[in-house]
Image (cartoon, rainbow, N blue to C red):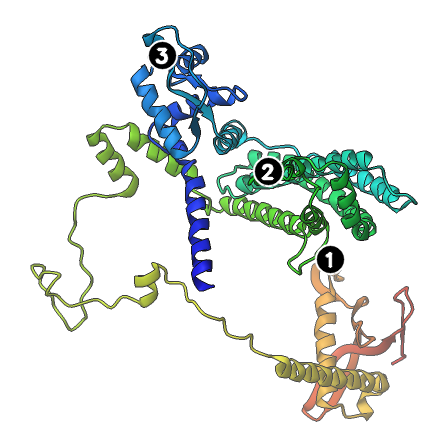
Amino acid sequence: MGASASGAGQDADEEARRRLNAYTYLSAPERLEHVAIMRVFCGTLLADLAVPDIMAKLRQAGASAAGLDADTLTVRLEQLVQWGNLLRSSHAVNASSISEYQRSRSRYQLSKLGERIQRDADGVLSEADAAREVSNELLALVERGLRELADLVTTPGGIEPQDGLERISTLFVQFTEFADSIRDFYAYLGQVLSRYDLDSAEYQGFKELLLDYVEAITEDVAFRAPRISAALDTLGPHIPALLERLDAHAQGLTGLAAQGETRLEVRVQRSRGRELADWEGLRGWFSDTDGQGSQVDQLRDATLRALQSLLANAKRMLRSATGEMSRRKDLLRLARWFDEAAPQDAHDIAVAAFGLYGARHLGTPPATDEVVPASTSWWTGPVVEVPVALRERGSRAQRGRASAVEDHSAQKQLLREAARQRAAVRAAAADELHSASGRFADVRLTSAALGLLLELLATALGNAQLSRHVSTGGERTAGFDLDSASSEDAELRIRLTVRRTAGTRTVLYSADGDLLLDDLELDIGRISAAADGEAETSVS
């Protein structure tokens, strides 16, 4: 069993190697000539061509191989036969002369593998950089076709075999075209969004052209995927019986290969939809059947990655305003200058661009207690300690996790408590002054009350109006008009009014000492809570 499995594995590897050899002509040095020759064969159906015929078609097409002579062209054709792209024709040659026989005896025809590879190569060469539109309308046709097929299959008597063949073939052609267009478009989208040299105009264009288009595709797929899954759930139990009826009605190549007493050893590739695996693949595109996620899920993830790439480009352009921009375009321009410059000019450009001047002997300041002569070589001189970060990464930035933010909640609580206590002391002092108004000679104020009174008094004196008084002799003197001097504290709802009255003496007694005010009369009042801001004052 082990030897048999090993032999089967070797055969599979050999077959894979033979098939991959057919791609060799696309990377050979003469690949342009090989491609031109293969296009000549792909332009015909089931035709074998001789060397003169191929030369005539090459000259007619004006291809890069049009100048090949017969001997060189024969070498190219034999090489393509060796790689498996062409086959030697087995058709008999009818010639009227020996020279005609010699020209036409070597005839070639296209192999199936060679035709498939050349068709794919032409598609890559002509459409690789183009943005392929997604055939979104085909998804609506797939949904409608599945629903109609499910209705017909579940009706009594089932669907007519020929009608079923036509519907299934149309359904899978539409789905294959839609899936291929999705893959091509998202491959192009990834190629575009991976660029980091987009300027603002290109970025805006790609954003409007591609991402708005992607959003429309994703919304349409998300809308129709549950409906298609529901139709496939209805069809699922009937698919095996339906495929058996279709095979009984039209077996195709499988029936022809099995006819007669001797069966033909031919591998037949069935049309899409004629195998149960095709339906399982269709179901796996729209719903998760193996735990790996559906293609719809992958489409949603790809859209998210496209948005992330767009945001990365947006951040890059924002950083460019501060000088942190990509230098790709500048480096490409510099590379073009190097490529076009003469050797001496290239040296001058390198010096100007990178500062690659001649060697200079640089030194570092020695230690204060160490004297190093200028003639000392770097090899034998004292070493300079270079930080690891600067030596390995070229950066002095610190790495590692940042320390946790210090918790100041306890200090904040202490400050709030201290502020609350100060507010309480000032409120008590305001109440004490209000109760002592008009009888300052009979009470002894606390330190807090006296401090608040002096604060209000200083503010009131600062608000006093300076006016000119005319004496009896006609001379003008400066003085303070205290009729309107007042101050207040809105938070404590207290007001102090200061009046100047000749001959009045106001004495304030407190724990910190006594204060004598000549010619000043003090009134303490409380500010009412009314919105108009009026205050009610006490009578001194």
Q: Amino acid at mark 3?
A: Tyr
Which residue is under mark 3? 101
Q: Residues within 10 Å of mark 3 (few under 14, many from 20)?
A: few
Secondary element type, mark 2 = helix
Task: Give the total number of marks visible in the rendering.
Answer: 3
Residue 346 is tagged as: none
Foreground residue, 536 or 8?
Answer: 8
Secondary element type, mark 1 = loop
Which residue is under mark 1? 474
N-term mark: 3 or 2 = 3
Image spot of residue 468 (x, y percent): 73, 59
Write the residue at 74% across / 71% down.
460
Measured in 3D between alpha carbons, the distance from the residue under mark 3 to the one under mark 2, in whole angstroms, is: 48 Å
Q: Which numbered mark, 1 or 2, is in the foreground of this view?
A: 2
Q: Is residue 243 left or right of residue 299?
A: right
Residue 184 is tagged as: 2
Q: Is residue 210 left or right of residue 108?
A: right
Label 1–label 2 contact, CB within 8 A = no
Label 3–label 2 contact, CB within 8 A = no
Q: Is residue 218 visible?
A: yes
Write the residue at 70% across / 74% down.
458
Foreground residue, 519 or 10?
Answer: 10
Q: Which numbered mark, 3 or 1, is in the foreground of this view?
A: 3
Foreground residue, 162 or 90?
Answer: 90
Q: Amino acid at mark 2?
A: Asp
Q: Is residue 193 left or right of residue 527?
A: left
Image spot of residue 373 (x, y percent): 8, 63
Secondary element type, mark 3 = helix
Q: Amino acid at mark 1?
A: Gly
N-term mark: 3 or 1 = 3
